[in-house]
Image (spheres, rainbow, N blue to C red):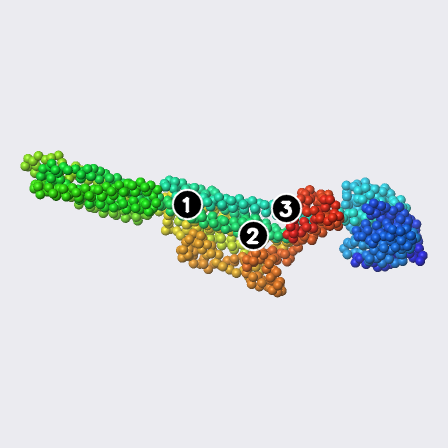
Amino acid sequence: MTAIETQVQYSSYMMTTTGQYMTQEEDWDRDLLLDPAWEKQQRKTFTAWCNSHLRKAGTQIENIEEDFRNGLKLMLLLEVISGERLPKPDKGKMRFHKIANVNKALDYISSKGVKLISIGAEEIVDGNGKMTLGMIWTIILRFAIQDISVEETSAKEGLLLWCQRKTAPYRNVNVQNFHISWKDGLALCALIHRHRPDLIDYSKLRKDDPIGNLNTAFEVAEKYLDIPKMLDAEDIVNTPKPDEKAIMTYVSCFYHAFAGAEQAETAANRICKVLAVNQENEKLMEEYEKLASELLEWIQRTIPWLENRVAEQTMHAMQQKLEDFRDYRRVHKPPKVQEKCQLEINFNTLQTKLRLSNRPAFMPSEGKMVSDIANAWKGLEQVEKGYEEWLLTEIRRLERLDHLAEKFKQKSSLHESWTSGKEQLLIQKDYESASLMEIRALMRKHEAFESDLAAHQDRVEQIAAIAQELNELDYHDAATINARCQGICDQWDSLGTLTQKRRESLERVEKLWETIDQLYLEFAKRAAPFNNWMDGAMEDLQDMFIVHSIEEVQSLITAHDQFKATLPEADKERMAIMGIQNEILKIAQTYGIKLVAENLYTVLSPQDISNKWEAVKQLVPMRDQMLQEEVARQQANERLRRQFAAQANIIGPWIQTKMEEIGHVSIDISSSLEEQMGSLKTYEQNIINYKSNIDKLEGDHQLSQEGLIFDNMHTNYTMEHVRVGWEQLLTTIARTINEVENQILTRDAKGISQEQLNEFRASFNHFDRVRNTEAFWFLDQANYLNVQHLQICNVISPNLLHLQKRNGMMDPDDFRACLISMGYDLGEVEFARIMTLVDANNTGVVTFQAFIDFMTRETAETDTAEQVMASFKILASDKAYITVEELRRELPPEQAEYCISRMTKYMISDAPSGALDYMSFSSALYGESDL
């Protein structure tokens, strides 16, 4: 074969875009193939290209024909550029050893899909320059140019298209081929300036200085881009048509240098994006854990305080407890309600971001799930409700105890005052030295005393009954009450015994005495009951009372009016008694009888009767005034009831209406998510502005409790109803806004159009079952407040019970029907797989958010662990590990240190010190392994 045939043969093979080699017709000039200038350019270029790779192995070549003859450096060159191990070379220096080594190299080239026509090991071993250059060109084509492809073009066309695009903006540059288009050096300078404008000032270059331009490009490329000088400026300028292979070889080095930098930048950007998402998610997780811990600690601190049911002994102390509880309701609890709501919002937002970034769902620490916090909050509210009921019950009990204790003291004082000195009178033996008249007088006096004693029996029984009730109500000073009551009872028993003994003594001597003054006797008999009546009247007029309504006051007024009606008859009795005394005085005056200083039959004097009567008449108007003051107090309480009812009857329906309107906005598919968000923000602001009405109602409720008003017939809404409804309204608007924000986040992150999202929502709403949420809301409140179901039904209007609203979830059958309606062909296995995606916790329902996440996964792409691994592999120059220096060189400082702190060591024996395992790290980012 002639040299010309050989040159045509090795030059006629070009690689296609599919990686196979085929013969292409090229119009090469026969004379140019033998042009020494071309061969010189090829030899210099190919030598420099080979040395750029061999220096990585610590060697180089001086003469391309001679240094490849033994095959050793040829095999080493192939190992460096391919990254693969070739068969072990023969160590001998005989010709057949060299041929064997060259054949191993040629066999390896053939194994890569290259057909070597007429290139044999013998020609290479014999130092055939043209065959050696042809072989090197084949290697360059396969390992340096084959992988270049732009818009599905061949390697040569792709490289040319890449050069054209990169140099298009530059003046005096028009790349049309790989020979004369590069003679003035501007194309090479433009390539460098396009990617590294800091290395060349392109504006200072001149087209009439091609040698200066070429040398500038060669020097900059060698110094800053690690591209060896493969061409000679004078050869290119002085050759009419520079060698195309030499130019292609040199330009391909620029492509690989700059394409690798672009790949590294793209890979670094991808890693930064993934790491930024991971860092943000970890920050959200830490914030959730902190907020959940603080809220749970507050609940755990508050519940023991609310469970402390140790009753105070005084009304003032219990009132202070009630005030502390109101302060807790007004000041301490509202911020915690906001924290609980914000915690749920943060949790939902975090889970949405994790789903969107293809990360595993966030699982909080044990005991800090949203459900755990909800259960703890529910327990707090139950204890809180029980604590308030206990406070009010204890206040009523203490009020009753104070009233009974005061009544006991008053009756006991009256009784003790009456019994004072009675025992001494009963035990004296004055009858032993008395005259007949005095004996009879003592007898009558004793009978009057017995009558008085019998009249006081009822008062003693009342005192005992009050003492027993105080014991049953656990009065704090029951020991004193019991001691005093026991003393009264013991004294009463002693008086009965002494009275009986004195009567027996007087009856023994009664027969000894015959005369008795009938008038004194009559006075004593009539004065004693009248005096007892006045004592009872005075006691009743001074009696304390406690009422809770105008009707109860009116009953007391009626009783008092009936008492006043008896006063004329009582006055007649008084006049009759005073008439007896007047008759005595008249008889004494008439018959000249000297009267003793006192009536022997009674301790009562006419003056005593007159004084008590005047006292009774003074107490009557005082009683009138007390009753009128109580009427005024009850009327004020009635005004408070009506004032509270007027506001509650407005606020309750308003809350119901806002709940319904928010529900309608959340399922409206006729408007965009942004419009829904605007509507919800407006509702949120209106709700915030409405807070003043709730505060005013709280103020009226506090006034009612301070006035001890515990019932209100003018409204079915209690303050607890309104509080629960208000808290649920705040939670609902916040949760609904969060759901719409997550939908917007999903739409924007996944690139879903508004029309697609509306289609998803319409399909979901069509299969979403309905229920009566407004009535359900009120029945939930009824269960919370232990209100009877029938009573709540009276609160809810009949029309409200027929309102229906979607519940925001589908059961599996509805979800299957929805997917079929959207064109899914579902078998049992496929549907079971889908259900594990949309219902990971096996709750039996599919929420709207889970439905949206599933549909977006079906229509959008996300980063995967494999993509991140591929990006790291580019940064690591195709190694299975990456070094600290490479991370710090390719990534920003924050992301680089993040990777270094979390990547594990690459556990392979021949790995260098400091090698890191980026594969396990990439898998861990997506929950596929543990860091």
Q: Mark 1 to mark 3: distance in Å?
A: 48 Å
Q: Position of residue 735 (x, y in %)?
A: 53, 51
Q: Amino acid at mark 1?
A: Arg
- Name the residue tied to disc 3: 279
422 above or below 38?
above
Q: Which comes sooner in the sequence, label 1 or label 3?
A: 3
Given the image, on which type of amino acid does mark 2 rest?
Glu
Q: Quadrant of residue 429?
A: top left
Q: Between disc 2 and disc 3, whose residue precedes?
A: 3
Dot 3: element: helix
Do we see residue 624 in this rendering?
A: no
Residue identified by numbered label 1 = 309
Picture disc at residue 739:
2
* Residue plotted at (61% across, 48% down): 281
| Image spot of residue 177 (x, y percent) | 84, 52
Please indicate whether residue 804 sits to the left or right of residue 163 in the image: left
Mark closer to the observer (1, 3): 1
Above or below: residue 799 compared with residue 338: below
Instruction: Name the residue located 18 percent from the left edge and 39 percent from the top edge.
Output: 426
Closer to the chain start, of discs 1 and 2, is 1
- Of residues 192 and 532, which is closer to you in this image? 532
Using the rendered view, name the quadrant where residue 629 is placed.
Answer: top left
